Amino acid sequence: MAKGLLKYFMLKLISERKHSGYELIKEIEEHGGSKPSTGTVYPLLKSMQSEGWIKGIEQNDKTYYEITKPGKEKLNEYNTIKKDYITKMHESVSIINETFHQEGHLMYIEQMELVHPLIEEIIQLQNKGIDQERIDK
């Protein structure tokens, strides 16, 4: 899972209830099929904490993370961006169908194969910190 998506997913999980780093790793593995490393998860937690999105609370010799008001605002921003991209992807798939296949509709897998490079490029730009408005253009 790309770091940008992992960070969003971790924030989403923390918004649902307090999580320790270990609990996040286990839950991400259950949902995503692969286990993220501690070397990936804990720096992301530190990053989110320094950005003010989450705060750590010490309980029973463990740190549990909970979402903050700025974290909720960031999550809402991510959700809006996600909805916009889903809409744009559906529009793109429709255009792809019209452009590349005149005798019927492409299968969903074929559509995703055509759109996948675009999705990967968007994720890379987001991970590099490129302004969202610039990516949209």
Image (tube, rainbow, N blue to C red):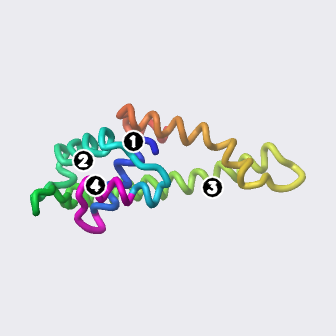
The amino acid at mark 2 is: Leu
The reply to whether discs 1 and 3 touch (Cβ–Cβ < 8 Å) is: no
Q: Is residue 133 above or below residue 28?
A: above
Between the residue at mark 3 and the residue at mark 4, the CA separation in whole angstroms equals: 36 Å
- In which image quadrant can residue 4 be found? top left
Which portion, as a residue range, is magenta? 15-27
Between the residue at mark 1 and the residue at mark 4, the CA separation in whole angstroms equals: 17 Å
- Where disc 2 sits, the SS reads helix
Q: Which residue is the site of mark 1?
A: 3
User: Can you tell which of label 3 and label 4 is closer to the viewer?
Assistant: 4
In the image, is 92 to the left or to the right of 61? right
How many neighbours does mark 3 have within 10 angstroms: few (below 14), some (14-19), or many (20 or more)? few
Residue at horizontal 31%, vertical 45%?
41
Q: Earlier in the sequence, mark 3 or mark 4?
A: 4
- Where disc 3 sits, the SS reads helix
Between the residue at mark 1 and the residue at mark 2, the CA separation in whole angstroms equals: 12 Å
Q: Which residue is the site of mark 3?
A: 90
- Where disc 4 sits, the SS reads helix
The amino acid at mark 1 is: Lys
**Outermost residue toward the front in this view:** 61
Q: Which residue is the site of mark 2?
A: 45
User: Can you tell which of label 1 and label 4 is closer to the viewer?
Assistant: 4
Q: Which residue is the site of mark 4?
A: 22
Between residues 9 and 130, which one lies in front from this camera angle?
9
Rendering coords of residue 22 (x, y %): 28, 54
Q: Earlier in the sequence, mark 1 or mark 3?
A: 1
How many neighbours does mark 2 have within 10 angstroms: few (below 14), some (14-19), or many (20 or more)? many
Q: How many marks?
A: 4
User: Can you tell which of label 3 and label 2 is closer to the viewer?
Assistant: 2
Q: Earlier in the sequence, mark 1 or mark 4?
A: 1
The amino acid at mark 3 is: His
